[in-house]
Image: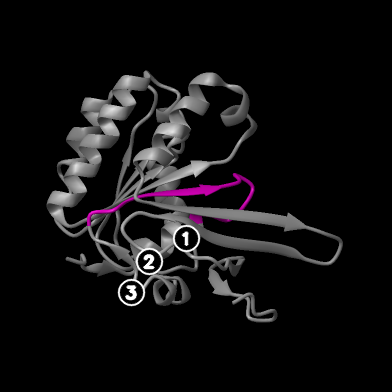
Amino acid sequence: MSRRRMATGVSVVDDRLDGGLPAGSLVALVAPPETQSELLLYELTAERQTLYISTVRTEASVKQAFDRTDVDVGNPMVAYAGHESGFDEIGDVVGRAGTETNLVVDAANPLERRDAAAYQSFLNKLHTYVRRTGSIAVLHCLRTDAVAVDPAAARGRETTLGIADVVFELHRTVDASDVETLLVASKFRGGRALTNPIKLVLTDDVTVDTSRDLA
């Protein structure tokens, strides 16, 4: 039986995914840190109630970014989970979210570097929670050199991508005349991955570049 689809806030992505992400999905958004990938998270928050858990920026910093963006982010709940926050504590915060919500973790990298067994247990519990509540969880995974050279970070990223139902990858290339940003859905468990990338323009909001049709 197919699960209800939940819109991402980016219409062309939702169209390609037959309406959006299946409710109950654990999603990894893998992107270079120098891109405007946060805008994709902001578009998501406008679709439904969101619990936005920041592991890097403070709660005040995240709220200020929401206030300054041109994207209509709705009224997300924001929580800070720094290095002193244990997985059980983060789980307690998640448990206060409602049903059919977005749960965003920005960024997953600090959690991926923690104890491997504890991180895997946390992800499995998070996955169980979103399936039970008809929600979606999005892990913002920054593609950095540390992930490639640090064994703990690499192991954590492997765990993230293995457990995730859906993996979005954002790729950015720069030449003398253009900045090209491509979004690929490389994994879609129980569904159809996208064989063609979507060319996005990430400035102060998210638009689709139709100047060269990649489909």
Q: Which mark is residue 40?
A: 1
Residue 198, given in percent of the width and then of the height, sits at: 57, 69
Residue 170, position as x, y percentages in the image: 57, 55
Quarter of the rendering containing residue 108: top left
Q: Is residue 142 left or right of residue 3?
A: right
Q: Is residue 28 magenta?
A: yes
Residue visible at 20% across and 65% down in the picture:
3
In this view, which residue lies farthest toward the right?
A: 176
Mark 3 and mark 1: Cα distance apart in space? 16 Å
- Circle 2/circle 3 CB separation < 8 Å: no
**What amino acid is at disc 2?**
Thr
Which dot, 2 or 3, sits closer to the camera?
Answer: 3
Checking the image for residue 8, the label placed there is: 2
Of mark 2 and mark 3, the one earlier in the sequence is 2
Badge 3 element: loop
Q: Secondary structure at mark 2?
A: loop
Q: Residue at x 24, y 43 (%)?
A: 127
| Residue of label 3 | 19
Label 1 crowd bin: few (<14), some (14–19), many (20+), radius 10 Å: some
Disc with the residue nearer the chain's start (3 vs 1): 3
Image quadrant in which the N terminus is located: bottom left
The x and y percentages for residue 58 are 42, 37
State left or right for residue 176 relative to residue 151: right
Q: Which region is colored magenta?
A: 24-38
